[in-house]
Structure formats: structure tokens, C-alpha cells
Image (cartoon, grey):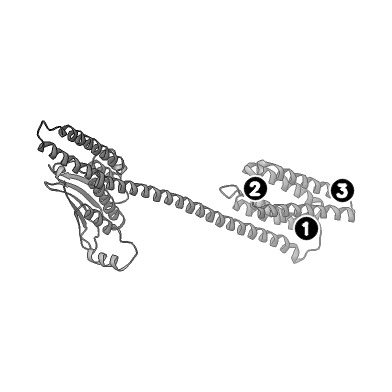
Amino acid sequence: MDSPASSPAPLVLTPVLRVLRLCLHALLAGLLALAAVKAVAVGGPHAYAVVAAAVLMAGVYAVGTLSPAVGRSQRAATVWLAALGVSWLALLVVSPDGLWAAFPLYFLQLHLMPMRWGLAAVAVTATAAITSFVLHGQPISPGTFIGPLLGGAVAIATVLGYQALYRESERRRELIDELLSTRAELAEAERSAGTLAERERLAREIHDTLAQGLSSIQLLLRAAERALPAEDPALAHIRQAREAAQDNLAEARRFVRALSPPDLEHGSLAAALERLCTRTTGGPAVQFSVSGTPVELPTPYEVALLRIAQSALANTVRHAGAGRAEITLSFMDTSVALDVVDDGKGFDPHAVRRAVASTDEGGFGLPAMRARARSLGGTLSVESAPGQGTAVAITLPLPAGARS
């Protein structure tokens, strides 16, 4: 039938299962036809009763196979099995040949009932078949008992084997679905990471080329404006050029801000770092603090410090086994510093550096952080030892315009 009661979801009617159903239909129909034909051929007072009982059982079976409710409802399946059992018992009363119909009944009982009730039903059915054969006065032989019992054992082994194969197939299907879903998520994450990296690259390029060039032009024009006498006719053109350069510099800075990471779009670097500490889960308790008087930093500085903090904190969560971590952003007269400290198990920085240099696998976190710091003229240092925690410190020189 459509689904075993013991399984959590209906079985999908695969081609193999459809063939098995057709074989079960043909088996029962053949056995009932054999009992009816034999009764008519042999004759006797109960011949027509055997034919009527066989037709009744075939009719009950057909009603159940054509009824959608039997496949959907445990109650409907139980009622149908009970009616089928009663019709089979009626056939057993009038003909000992009805016992052979027990074999397809085994499959139906195991298929539609919970396993423990199905096993009990198979045992009762086998007992009824053997008892009927004996009561009809048929010659008793070992096959009288072995046949129904062996048939029940074969049915049980077949159903249990099929259910095990089905569960394994479902597990593999779920695993494939999970792998496909994970691959899609990974592709989306890679696209997002690539988009963010390209935005950061464009922001750095605009800042380091257009914005710096426009700033230099503005300073040069301002110097020229101061050097010329007030009555010089070129002064108005110089002032106009300086204002145009100033407007374009402001526009370039707006582009840089628009291309900055989303975490920096809704506030300052300090606010982004505090959100980072709050969102970090599955690891140590993370605290954030600010030291000194905050000043506005160029976008590349904020991006570099945020990315280094994210990378260092991710390393702490994955590898340190720490119970507590702290991120400190320090503003000094001529520099800005970021410290990420944890009380985890620590490591040997020199051993890690040698391992990274001697292999192509992994270990790109610290080199990437150092590269970010060097690109802005800063330094990055790592202090750690086994069992003594880790401290990552980055120091960037403040540009002249950002110093307090």
C-alpha cells in the first residue's frame, strides 16, 4: 500500500514499489482463483460457498486498494485489514486451501500496521492457517506447520529489509539535499564576500588616487590663491578651480563611504566594533572599550581595523578555547591602536610562522592582517605562549588631518 504505518512519512511510489504492489495483487487474485477453481472441480457440498467466500475476499481487497483513505489514515487501514481478515476466516471455514492466502496477508499486515502489531498479526494469521488445515482433517505433515511459519518469516524479513533500504535511501537523499543547500549557501557567501572585497578595493583605490589627488590639487590651489595679489585677474579662476576640486573631493569621499563595509554604514568604527562583540556567540564573553579621545578616521583605516578585529576574534572563537576576550580601541596623539586579547590556550607564534612558511595549507589569517597593517604604514604584533592566552595589537599612524 501507499505507506507503512510505522514510517513517519508516506512512501513515494517508485517504479519498484509499483511492481511489488502489482505482484501482490496478482498473487492474492491467483490464490483465490485457485481455491475457487479447485472447489468447483472437486465438487462437494461447499463448492459454491468457497466461490462466494473467495469473491467476497477479492471484493474487500479491491475496495481497500482503490480507497485513498487506506493509505492516508491508520484507522481506515485497520478497519480494512479487519474486514479482509474476517473474509479470509470465512474462506478458511469452508476450504482448507484458503490458508495459502495468508502469505499476501502477511505483507499487508506488516506494511500497514505498526511493526509490533504487525508481528502479532502475522503470528495470529499463521496460527489460524495451521488450525484451519488441521480442523479440516487434512493429512498432517511437517509442511503443515513449516509452510505458514516459513512464509511469515520470509514476509517479515522482506518487509524489514525493504524498510531498512528505504531509510538508507531517505538518509542519502537528505544528505544530498543538505549538500546541495550547503553548496548554494557557500556560493552565495562567496559572492557576498567577493562583492564586499571589491567594494573595499574600490573604496581604497578611490581614496588613494582620486581623493588624495583632489586633496593635493585643493591645497596647491589654496597656496596659489594666497600667493597672488588681490587684484590679480587670475585669482577668481583659481578660487573657482579650488572650489570645484573641493566639491569633487567631497563627492569622492561620499563614494568611499558608500563603498565601505555594511557594518560601518550605520555608525562609527567604535559602534561597529561594539556590535561585533555583541553578535559574537559560541565562544568567550567579549568586552569592548575605547581609550583616548576618538577622532574621525579615514575609511581605509576603519575598514582595516574592523576586518582585523573580525579575523582576530574569529580565530579566538575557533581555536583559543578562551573564556573571556577583550577588544580595545585606543586613540593616541599620532596613532590609533587596536588590541584583541583573550585568556585562551595560546600558541607559539614562531612555530606558526614556520609552519605557514613551509606549507601551502591554511594559516593565512595572520599574514592577511599584517598585510592590511603594512598597506597603511602600520604594524601588527602577536604575543602568545602555550597556556598564556593571546594578544594581537595593530598600530596605525594617524594622518595629519585626523590628529587631535
Residue under circle 2? 2
Nearest to the observer: residue 173 or residue 126: 173
Label disc, if present, on residue 250 of the rendered structure: none
Given the image, on which type of amino acid does mark 2 rest? Asp
Quarter residue 124 falls in: bottom right
> Is 55 positioned to the left or the right of 123 in the image?
right
Identify the residue at the far front of this view. Answer: 233
> Is 58 positioned to the left or the right of 367 in the image?
right
Mark 2, Cα crowd under 10 Å, few <14 / some 14-19 / many 20+, is some
Q: Judge depth for marks 3 and 1 and give the one in front.
A: 3
- Secondary structure of residue under mark 2: loop
Mark 3, Cα crowd under 10 Å, few <14 / some 14-19 / many 20+, is some
Could you tell me how many numbered marks the image carries? 3
Given the image, on which type of amino acid does mark 1 rest? Phe
Above or below 215: residue 338: below
Identify the residue at the far bottom of this view. Answer: 358
Q: Is residue 216 visible?
A: yes
Q: CA distance from mark 3 to mark 1?
A: 19 Å
- Labels 2 and 1: the sequence-earlier one: 2
Label disc, if present, on residue 48 of the rendered structure: 3
> Is 1 positioned to the left or the right of 183 in the image?
right
- Secondary structure of residue under mark 1: helix
The x and y percentages for residue 382 are 21, 58
Given the image, on which type of amino acid does mark 3 rest? Tyr
Nearest to the observer: residue 153 or residue 311: 311
The x and y percentages for residue 128 are 72, 54
- Labels 3 and 1: the sequence-earlier one: 3
Label disc, if present, on residue 133 of the rendered structure: 1
Badges 2 and 1: C-beta atoms under 8 Å apart? no
Badges 3 and 2: C-beta atoms under 8 Å apart? no
Quarter residue 132 falls in: bottom right
